[in-house]
Image (cartoon, helix red, strand yellow):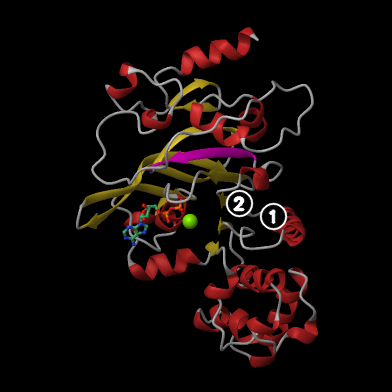
């Protein structure tokens, strides 16, 4: 049986706003096997970062459970959670704003080691920092450098080294390469892949850019307005996207697969609407080229319509049969 490291069950995070309740993450469920990567994609504002933060309880979930290695971490007290958080880390998009500009690499990377009293001996701490720098490919001579003295790729390597300092098992990677030049993106992605293999890490890899996770994720979950609208093994999702929203997202990137079904560029009407006071109808209906009255009756549930392939769409079966008729 597959070894699930993380189960997210009916996770929601709402924010109170002057205009009403904002459903940033709304009843999202999925699980991840140990050592695998789940990619989470969707347009800016669809709730990816909030989901990642709620899973780590960096923001308190409104509802739902997060089962990490068999423990529901939403039930842990502060002390227990701090202990657990060693195993569960995060890497941010913009290493420049997430790193303290007044701290050297040495100070930034050693901080969690000192704060958590993992090591106390000064020389041992410095040796551990050097070791972490080597692991992420930072030259030792940079140990006393400040973030502004380094390029974006090196800054992100510091962020990764800091996340690794506690020997975590699971890392939420929130758009870790989105702020980087394309040439550097590949280096960082390769580094993350190598680290995953070496250290047996499990990742949630958040991005608004599907092309980035094409060859990185085992499974991909697509979010729209706080909801999961589709989830499938990466290759299947890229070859047979079923939800009209996933199809539109994919149609915007060049087709790399030979022999896969041809894609036509689908231009989405309108923009992602605000997730405040949403009516009970398909959240994508207003932008969907297939939508009709049925889609306005009720927000469809996420259903497994093929082993491992989940979709929330009133017409999912029709799309499925369309694909197999081709
Ligand atoms: N602290 C907050 N207070 C109020 N609304 C928030 C807060 N954080 C995020 N949101 C809103 O939640 C929604 C999802 O945001 P976010 O998770 O950052 O999306 P993404 O990471 O996919 O771009 C957005 O509408 C955003 O404005
Ligand atoms: Mg975000």
Q: Please tell me in which quadrant of the rendered image residue 286 appears.
A: top left
| Closer to us: 9 or 254 | 254
The residue to which callout 1 is attached is 196
Q: Is residue 308 above or below residue 275?
A: above
Establish if 132 lies above or below 257: below
| In the image, residue 219 lies in the stretch drawn in magenta | yes
Residue at figure coordinates x 63%, y 25% from the top left: 264
Q: Report if residue 31 lies within the magenta region.
A: no
Q: Secondary structure at mark 1?
A: helix
Which is the main secondary structure of the residues drawn in magenta?
Answer: strand
Spatial separation of the CA atoms under disc 1 and disc 2:
7 Å
Who is closer to the viewer here, 163 or 122?
163
Quadrant containing the C terminus in the rendered view? top right
**Residue drawn at 44 percent across, 37 percent down:** 228
Image quadrant where residue 155 sits: bottom right
Mark 2, residue position: 202
Q: Residue at x 58, y 45 (%)?
A: 39
313 or 179: nearer the viewer: 179
Label 1 or label 2, whichever comes before in sequence order: 1
Residue that sits furthest to the bottom in the current view = 122
């Amino acid at each position: 049986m597959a070894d699930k490291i993380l189960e997210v069950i009916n996770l929601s995070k709402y924010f109170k706003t002057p205009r009403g309740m904002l459903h940033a993450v709304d009843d999202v469920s999925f699980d991840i096997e140990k050592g695998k990567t789940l990619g989470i994609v969707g347009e800016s504002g669809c709730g990816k970062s909030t989901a990642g933060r709620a899973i780590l309880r960096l923001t308190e979930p409104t509802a739902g459970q997060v089962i990490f290695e068999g423990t529901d971490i939403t039930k842990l007290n502060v002390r227990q959670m701090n202990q657990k958080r060693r195993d569960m880390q995060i890497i941010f998009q913009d290493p420049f704003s997430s790193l303290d500009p007044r701290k050297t690499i040495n100070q930034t990377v050693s901080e969690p080691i000192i704060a958590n009293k993992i090591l106390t001996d000064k020389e041992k701490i410095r040796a551990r920092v050097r070791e972490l720098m080597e692991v992420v490919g930072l030259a030792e001579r940079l140990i006393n450098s400040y973030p502004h003295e380094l390029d974006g790729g090196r800054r992100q390597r510091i962020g990764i080294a800091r996340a690794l300092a506690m020997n975590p098992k699971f890392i939420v990677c929130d758009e870790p390469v989105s702020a980087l030049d394309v040439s550097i993106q590949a280096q960082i992605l390769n580094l993350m892949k190598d680290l995953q293999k070496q250290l047996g890490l499990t990742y949630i890899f958040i991005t608004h850019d599907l092309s980035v996770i094409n060859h990185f994720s085992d499974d991909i979950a697509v979010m729209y307005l706080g909801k999961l609208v589709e989830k499938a093994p990466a290759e299947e999702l890229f070859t047979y996207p079923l939800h009209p929203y996933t199809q539109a997202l994919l149609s915007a990137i060049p087709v790399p697969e030979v022999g896969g079904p041809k894609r036509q560029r689908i231009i989405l009407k309108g923009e992602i609407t605000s997730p405040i006071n949403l009516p009970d109808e398909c959240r994508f209906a207003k932008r969907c080229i297939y939508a009709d009255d049925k889609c306005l009756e009720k927000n469809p549930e996420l259903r497994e319509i093929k082993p491992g392939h989940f979709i929330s769409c009133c017409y999912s079966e029709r799309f499925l049969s369309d694909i197999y008729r081709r």
